[in-house]
Amino acid sequence: MSATVQHPQSLHELAPGLALARGGPGRTLNIYLLGTVVLDSGVRWSRRRLGRQLAGRRITAHVLTHAHFDHAGSSAWLCETFGVPLWCGAGDAAAIGTGRVDTLGTPWVNRLQRTLLPVTAHPVTRTLREGDLVSGFEVLEVPGHSRGALAFWRERDRVLVCGDVLANFGLHPRRPRLVLAPAALSSDYEQNRRSAARLAKLRPRLACFGHGFAFTDPGRFAAAVDQLGSGSS
Ligand SMILES: [Zn+2]
């Protein structure tokens, strides 16, 4: 494992065995450590920031919630730098394995994204399935935002990491604004809504997102998911 800087930044401990790293300013690009497993890697320019936060730490694997450019952008770098395997949901393995990561719906926008924010191809050595365990978290298959989207659930203290099934666009922790990704950014919008409803039923005490502040009130989380409109805003 390489430690690239002399002054590693501390991570934010959210719960036992769960820490937040940052792939961008504030909570724009959340990266999590489940024990020694790094979950997501931000965009391709997250690597320097992520390298500072992970320097000197023992890392054993890298997992994706889903293979989009803002979650897998530094994944090849991370796996090569730390010498760890890449795992993801079966439905997203081809995308990251080939670097043909579609995020934004229309072909021309996808081409633009691949030009401006390319994702380096990296082989997936393990595809995760419903019920698999990663550092004590149970894998949930929650397709809809992408075909192979995954969430991670720890029942004993009701901790959930959602990926982008939902995001919190609230700019303050006390003023949450839960959103579903629009249809143009989803492989199947209605399927993603069903995945969100499934997660709300878990009534997590801590719900963490790929973007934004965590929710710490299970009732408020369930109510916010309930209130999400049926349109594709
Ligand atoms: Zn995202």
Image (tube, rainbow, N blue to C red):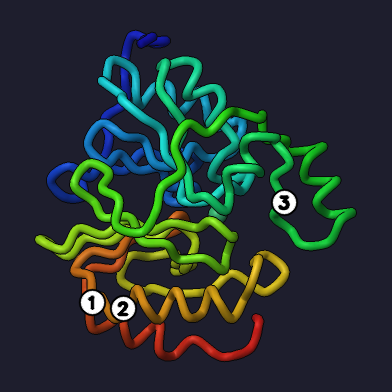
Q: Are marks 2 and 1 in contact (CB under 8 Å)?
A: yes
Which residue occupies 17% across, 65% down? 158
Packing grade of label 2 (10 A; few <14, some 14-19, many >=20) is many
Q: Is mark 3 within 8 Å of ligand 1?
A: no
In this rendering, the count of numbered labels is: 3
Which residue occupies 31% across, 83% down? 222
Distance between mark 3 and mark 1 Cα atoms: 31 Å
Three-letter residue code for mark 3: Asp
Q: Is residue 169 above or below residue 91?
A: below
Dot 2 falls on a residue whose secondary structure is helix
Badge 3 is on which residue?
102
Badge 1 is on which residue?
203
Distance between mark 2 and mark 1 Cα atoms: 7 Å
Of 163 and 219, which appears nearest the observer?
A: 163
Badge 2 is on which residue?
221
Labels 2 and 1: the sequence-earlier one: 1
Distance between mark 3 and mark 2 Cα atoms: 29 Å
Q: Position of residue 150 (x, y in %)?
A: 43, 56
Three-letter residue code for mark 2: Phe
Packing grade of label 3 (10 A; few <14, some 14-19, many >=20) is many
